[in-house]
Amino acid sequence: MNIEKFQIAEFNQSLQQSHERNFHHIAENINGLPEILQKLQDFQVAIPSWALGTGGTRFGRFSGGGEPRNIEEKITDVGLLHALNRSSGSISLHIPWDIPENAAAIKALAAQHDIRFDAVNSNTFQDQPGQAHSYKFGSLHHTDKAVRKQAIEHNIEVIRYGVELGSNALSLWLADGSCFPGQLNFRGAFKHTLDSLQEIYAALPSDWKLWIEYKAYEPNFYSTTIGDWGQSLLFANKLGPKAQTLVDLGHHLPNANIEQIVSLLLMEGKLAGFHFNDSKYGDDDLTVGSINPYQLFLIFNELIEGMDARSMNHATDLGWMIDASHNVKDPLEDLLQSVEAIMIAYAQALLVDTKALQAAQQDNDAVAAQEILQHAYRTDVRPLIAQARLLSGGVLEPVYFYRKLKVREGLIKERGLKTVATGL
Ligand code: AOS
Ligand code: ZN
Ligand code: ZN
Ligand code: ZN
């Protein structure tokens, strides 16, 4: 399944008139438009390899057909997304679901699609066939040194794969925790985890980062050894400058003020980046922006204010990644929607009059502060995103184009109807 340049051009042509009308309408009212468009063009969101197939739940999985059956097909799928939106220029691999056996060939394929390799993910939450020790009671925090050693070695192996592909971060999420009071000594689990992380940290190449993800609960339901941002930050501070905290939006207890967490981690230079998704109840991993787009906007507002204050590059100085998994949508359409939602929140936050907001804050003028934020939030920035895509050679309306071109039907023809992507 290949998308040709002329198909994109033809499609864009058919929407050109209405796009121009909408774009000029908004462009008139925006200061610094060229800079904003450039920032939107530069901004790239990494696609997780495991979101390219139907995730399912523990109750069932309903394959949509034409799913990628191997790492090559996953890269091809991300290439399709990137061809449409020009904002999905990297993939995040998960070992051992995606073993790059021939790194040179994999790199060449990715380069053809203009795709680079984002953070590599390790997996010590599942037992693999032939594995000596079980992770049933955890991995890096385990009471048994042999289990810890196996998990440490796995992480170091993942770093090696990442080095071959040109990645520069290890993203680590641990399922380690306990299901019942008394099952675990909290301090013992913390110390074991710290010892294990120190060994992994020591194996990082000089230009690498270690991203430590936290999660409130699931699969463990009483305690999680890296359960919140405080615990993750403790580890990151003890480990050193290469270790930072990764924020997955779905990993907080209900109604947590994520934007405040983000602001403080950024202030400390300890924010690694994001796993974007949305949720209503917990770690629902739903399409970004599908439930609470205002929260996403408020997060981006803190990010831009904080990054600008530290002279950080929006596009390159944090890890921007989606983490999604669900049962009912075409995964590629879902990812197009997620990237679009991220771009919208980013563009709206770029429109915030930061100086005016700071003045309102100084005066304790809560009404003015709300007016300023919501003025930006309620601006329909979709024509801006579309214009940035157009300038980058993408498609004005990616989901519409994807359906019109019958991309999924093409993939089903190539790969078959009953496909199971390796992964969750
Ligand atoms: C798990 O809940 C975390 O969100 C992980 O980041 C991620 O979903 C996992 O590594 C994919 O298996
Ligand atoms: Zn995650
Ligand atoms: Zn999540
Ligand atoms: Zn999660």
Image (spheres, rainbow, N blue to C red):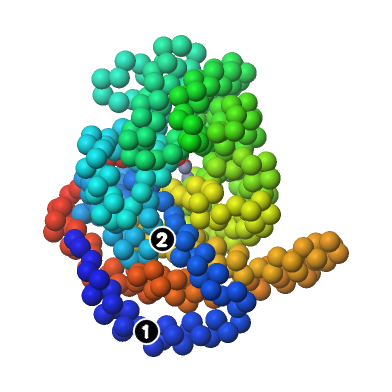
What residue lies at 60% left-to-right and 64% top-to-bottom? 349
Q: Is residue 208 positioned above or below 409 on the image?
A: above
Left or right relative to 89: residue 215: right
Q: Which quarter of the figure is the C terminus placed in?
A: top left
180 or 225: nearer the viewer? 225
Answer whether residue 280 is visible to the viewer in this image.
yes
Q: Residue furthest top?
A: 145
Residue type (three-letter) at the residue carrying disc 2: Ser
What residue lies at 41% left-to-right and 27% top-to-bottom? 155
Question: Within the image, what quadrant is residue 167 found in?
Answer: top left
163 or 7: nearer the viewer? 163
* Image location of residue 398, percent across then percent down: 35, 69
Tell which circle, 2 or 1, labels the residue nearer the N-terminal end. Answer: 1
- Classify mark 2: residues with Cα within 10 Å, few (<14), some (14-19) or many (20+): many
**Disc 2 to disc 1: CB gap under 8 Å:** no
Q: Is mark 1 within 8 Å of ligand 3?
A: no
Q: What residue did someone put label 1 on?
A: 16
Question: Within the image, what quadrant is residue 299 found in?
Answer: bottom right
* Image location of residue 62, percent across then percent down: 27, 50
Mark 2 residue element: loop
Q: Is residue 269 positioned above or below 126 on the image?
A: below
Distance from label 2 to label 1 (Cα)?
20 Å
364 or 142: nearer the viewer? 364
Residue type (three-letter) at the residue carrying disc 1: Gln
Q: Which quarter of the figure is the N terminus placed in?
A: bottom left
* Image location of residue 190, percent across then percent down: 58, 21
Answer whether residue 341 is visible to the viewer in this image.
no
Mark 1 residue element: helix
Q: What residue did someone put label 2 on?
A: 87
* Image location of residue 256, percent across then percent down: 64, 47
What residue lies at 20% left-to-right and 48% top-to-bottom? 419
Question: Within the image, what quadrant is residue 414 found in?
Answer: bottom left
